[in-house]
Image: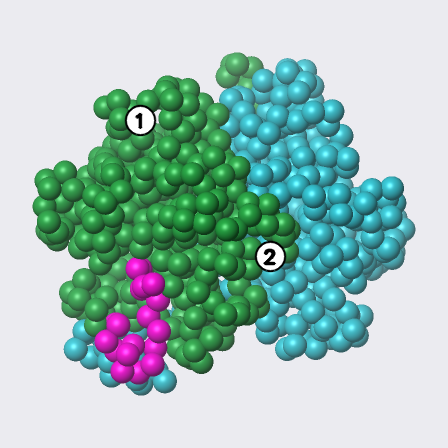
Chain colours: A cyan, B green
Amino acid sequence: MVERGAIADGNALRQTIFERYADFFPFDEIDPGLSLSEGFTPLVPSRMTASRLAVRNIFFKNETENPTWSFKDRGTAAGVQHAVSCGCGRIGTVSSGNMAVSVAAYGARAGLTTFALVSASIPTEKLSPIAVYGATVIRVDGDYGDLYFQSLEIGKRHDIYFINSDVPFRVEGSKSIAFEICEQTNFDVPDFVVVPTSSGGNFRGILKGFEEFKRCGLIADVPTMVCAQAAGCSPIHRAYVNNDPVISPVDHPETIAHAIENPFPPSGNQVLRKLRETGGLSAAVTDDEILQAQKELADEGIFGQPASAVPLAAVRKLRDRGIITEDHTVVCIVTGSGLKYTAVYGRYDLTVLSCSSAELEMMITEQQ
Amino acid sequence: MVERGAIADGNALRQTIFERYADFFPFDEIDPGLSLSEGFTPLVPSRMTASRLAVRNIFFKNETENPTWSFKDRGTAAGVQHAVSCGCGRIGTVSSGNMAVSVAAYGARAGLTTFALVSASIPTEKLSPIAVYGATVIRVDGDYGDLYFQSLEIGKRHDIYFINSDVPFRVEGSKSIAFEICEQTNFDVPDFVVVPTSSGGNFRGILKGFEEFKRCGLIADVPTMVCAQAAGCSPIHRAYVNNDPVISPVDHPETIAHAIENPFPPSGNQVLRKLRETGGLSAAVTDDEILQAQKELADEGIFGQPASAVPLAAVRKLRDRGIITEDHTVVCIVTGSGLKYTAVYGRYDLTVLSCSSAELEMMITEQQ
């Protein structure tokens, strides 16, 4: 039996997540020097949105405050600990988004050769944030879904650890999101935890974290997990509501939430099974609903990338249906920074005023 | 006498900086709901750069892990606490960069009318990250330096609190950077703390933080503070090395480190005086040196905006001159995220490879 007090015994300002929650990670020892102090992100209470939606409380787990400004750093950090402990000198990933940036940063820090495999169709400007860390970025012409499995095969043959989206160590890293939420709610966990779900690795990790704390008696219940997807690419949600035994690929994925636009998620069936076993929920939200939620999130002071607004949009939907009620407390996982996808500004009617310095005072008083 | 242990008594995962260091802030009470959990940023040790430069250790205080991804959030949070406690319903700032984004975010959260006054010459794409939080952005045609003072006058007349770059509450907020460094070094403070210096508000705040901890007996010494500027805009450094009594405006500022490109910093003379009183140092570095340092920082896994690399470039310079030696420990303040200024990618020779999926394995083995 782990004591609650023992966890908060250390000073989070001087620890890594792997040290603070050492009992729950599969490491005999860790090298703190590989860490960029990922995690320990804020749990920010809603000031306006909860009362507007008539929900008891909504918290935003702000994963944008990570070393590369997305939740991916937790799993990458776990993966790099593993790679280095095995003496593996090369790592890689299949991604052109948050995960590739994260793997590039941690690979650089660890002094590893790092491969980022991306689709041939990706525009160069998306690749610079990866290449700036010195990673070898390779555009691969061919089926992007197959590339996930091909990379694992190549990795096995050539001793390159591909820290892809749902590999076990990445799932382990994501557990720390749950551990922190437990601490931050004083072990009185929320009713719902809503996760933007793409590959399914982060969803699995967060659920596993809560389950492990429950098994140790640290929390009384595991929150109801909500798999939140974009309506334009919702293979897990679709299979769940249709009672399909397994997920099917989405033929023409299309959503502004590019970070979760995975048409055939590798952990999709595991998430589906877990949703059924645990009585979880799923929801799919349109691009308009995502943009509205992104604005509401910005009104709370948090600017997340579109995928990060999917949970809040899902909360609104579940509230409208009476599944989430005024008695409930909800945590939305805000997965990545709005600075990751600045093209979204074009979707807003952002106005800028102009005047001379002589006119300034009058212009300001007119705004009152 | 404050006990060291008392400070780390609370759990940083459940506190704001104003609660953790309450004895050192000028607030009778604070409203934690206004906070976005600013601060508590990592102090990341160098893995390669320190030994490459033959310095005992270099730490990076990673201020990019703040709610709007720059150090400005600490001062903004203090300013907004003050504004709300005074019943002031409107705030503003003169900035088109990190500070405006920060004030816009906190103003939105607090439900305040928020003005961001910017120069008429600023391109629209720099304004979207401010406007997305709902702030009123006004392009003002006229002298940008004068706008700082004009805004304070207008603010007095119309009850708008302009949380400009070096107002007292912003300086108070910056103290928390020093407090955290003390905790993170176990109260064994570094020999040097290097601050990218523009208005001078952050420099003053960090120094004040160390001085207050010393006065309470929490630390034995105040680190030597280093004012790091870009050679293309170094009014404080220039006055310091020339033994000028006061700073003079820089006529044609030009540097890639736009975030610290202030030709006539309002706290410049205060920083100058403090440098002289405390035996501080100053350094100016060229754009090429800044770019080199930005790359070295990325190799450590931290991608900062150009201004954030100025301290590391300054360390190299001071090391070359033998002022910093192999016996010294240094903290560099990494002030803001590299995602704030993506135009910098064009200054790097970033390469991307291409191949078909059939060629992938061969291409990877060729990279070995």
What residue appears at the point 60 percent right and 29 percent down from the top-left corner?
A32
- Of helix, strand and loop, which one carries label 2? loop
Residue A234, visible in the rendered structure:
no
Residue A249 horizontal side relative to residue A81, left or right: right
In the visual, does A91 lie left or right of B88? right
Percent coordinates x, y for residue A94 in the rendering: 60, 34
Numbered tag placed on residue B186 in the rendering: none
Among the two numbered marks 1 and 2 on one chain, the one whose residue lies closer to the N terminus: 2
- Residue at the image point whose x is 46% and y is 57% from the top: B24
Q: Secondary structure at mark 1?
A: loop
Q: Chain of mark 1?
A: B
Mark sitting on residue B324: 1
Residue identifier under label 2: B15
Packing grade of label 1 (10 A; few <14, some 14-19, many >=20) is many
Residue type at mark 2?
Gln
| Picture coordinates of residue B112, whole percent (x, y) | 45, 76
